[in-house]
Image (tube, rainbow, N blue to C red):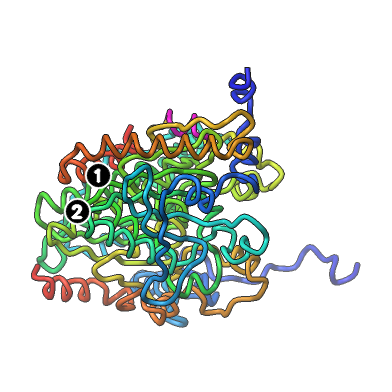
Amino acid sequence: MAWFESPAQEPLRVPTAALWVVCPKCNSYVAKAEWAAACKVCPKCDHHARLNCRERVQLLTDTDTFEEINANVSVNDPLKFKDASGSYAAKSKATIQKTGLGEAILTGTCAIEGSAVVLCVMDFAFMGGSLGSGTGERILLAAEKAVSLHRPLIIVSASGGARMHEGIVSLMQMAKTCAAIAKVKEAGLPYFSILTDPTTGGVSASYAMIGDLNIAEPKALIGFAGRRVIEQTIKQDLPDDFQTAEYTMAHGFIDHIVPRKEMKAFLAKILRYAGF
Amino acid sequence: MAKKIQKKLTAWEIVQLARHAERPNITAYCEAMCDDFIELHGDRLFGDDRGLIGGFATIGGERVVLIGHRKGSNVEENIDANFGMASPEGYRKAMRLMALAEKYKLPVVSLVDTPGAYPGAEAEANGQAEAIAHNLEFMARLKTPIIVVVCGEGGSGGALGIAVGDRILMLENAVYSVISPEGCASILWRDGSQAPLAAETLKITAEHLLELGIIDTIISEPAGGAHKKPTVAVASVKKAILKELAELRKLALGDLIEKRYQKFAAMGRF
């Protein structure tokens, strides 16, 4: 029996998933405790792995101050959409069960180092953080809450863009959310947009790009059109740093890039500058 | 009889009509619908997009600011206009002209006809996302009436970037969608040839959009499509614009803007 046929080899002992996390960027093994302490930022390559919205809320808010609002607003299926892999109704139901979220965004009131704000946090695990009508409605209601409570509005984006399954209704959420944010600004209230990996398509082309300040996490993918679409359009390869937070800042569309661990303190600081 | 035949068109057939090379384009509207059109160029920041144009126009004696995508009428013009795929400088020029409209108390008429915003490297570098986003915010609060007419293709964010308004009109054989049927088919069906099915499923026709509460009025087209009798089609658009304009002029500015807010707030509220 040749060596390549041998089935009896003891498999290589790999670190068990119970103790280790593999960095999705550099493939380094990081001890789970260290990974958690670093808020899912790789100590080897500084990759900022995706956070779910609960983790993000915990990271940014004062302990036990976050109170969810708009929890009753959930997914709609205006087109009764079905594609090759099944119905949107079934898919969204499964996503709700899996994530424990009603939509791709969690909205609520909270305090950041003592400043009262309205905070919205997107979750990429919920259908790619796509902008559905429930997402848009939650944002609009949160913005209206900010106006009625006279508080700053902060939105943390993580989204691939529009939710195709809701067709034109999804597209309209771009206009709807921007209209709501225009009202926040008209009331003289600050609106800060935090762009995390990824913030693209219809979300970057609406509320994510119109912050008083646009703040990004290091290396986050930020852009309008997809890289592949652009490469097909211009028939050439794009540089590696194309559509990174750093690239977007160099072109004038991001105010500041803030490492994850410093984000809360940074927000507290700019809230003070804004008078809150 | 012709009407009955028209009713039987599939979504995919309507897509073909919406994209028809001889369909009346913004140049046709400027010539046949406007007594006067003075094109105003440039975003004052970077350049002058040829895929999204605008200027002062007079329609049936009414002075307005007209903005719209330009696809061009022949290959040379198509290339010059980048096939109606606007760049950030186009959206910023549109915003500049809309600010002028507000200042001079002129209504805005916006003609939508684009496959989508230009997905190029330069457009990204110059802030395609920011340019569209800023327009959405700006148009939501613009202190003058805005009438939008989806004339041909309403291609996603590139269309919406000039399509926030008090009245959204749509030609019978125009389409308006979050993604092209081809794009949707290749992503969700993993097969571009399923575009006709995607077109049906996405509900992108005027009839569906009226049902969904996205548009206010459908403007009928001559049998076989607007390109069969362009003069008739353009006249219908002109008539519809003037009718809506007369209605909107009756509203106080504060009410106008609040109603515009409520209109979009209601979209996707079930």
Report the amino acid beneath label 1. Tyr
Report the amino acid beneath label 2. Lys
- Which part of the image, by quadrant, shows the N terminus of chain A? bottom right
- Position of B18 with respect to A98 (left or right) is right
Residue A100: % across, % down: 36, 44
Tell me which secondary structure the magenta stretch mostly adopts.
helix
Q: Are marks 2 and 1 in contact (CB under 8 Å)?
A: yes
Distance from disc 2 to disc 1, alpha carbons, whole Å, reads 9 Å
Q: Say which chain tag 1 marks.
A: B
Q: Please count the marks in the image.
A: 2
Residue in view at x 49 percent, y 48 percent? B29
In this view, A185 is above or below B208 = below
Residue in view at x 54 percent, y 73 percent? B121
In this view, A170 is above or below A182 = above
Q: According to the image, label 1 marks what residue?
A: B261
- Position of B250 with respect to B124 (left or right) is left
Residue A262: % across, % down: 26, 77
Residue A157 visible in the picture: no
Residue A61: % across, % down: 20, 63
Corner quadrant of residue B1: top right
Q: Secondary structure at mark 2?
A: helix
Residue A26: % across, % down: 53, 77
Point out the stretch of residues depicted in magenta. B204-211
The verdict on residue B30 being magenta is no
In this view, A140 is above or below B98 = above
Q: Say which chain tag 2 marks.
A: A
Residue A159 visible in the picture: yes
Q: According to the image, label 2 marks what residue?
A: A183
Judge by depth and name the residue closer to the eye, B114 or B103: B103
Corner quadrant of residue B24: top right
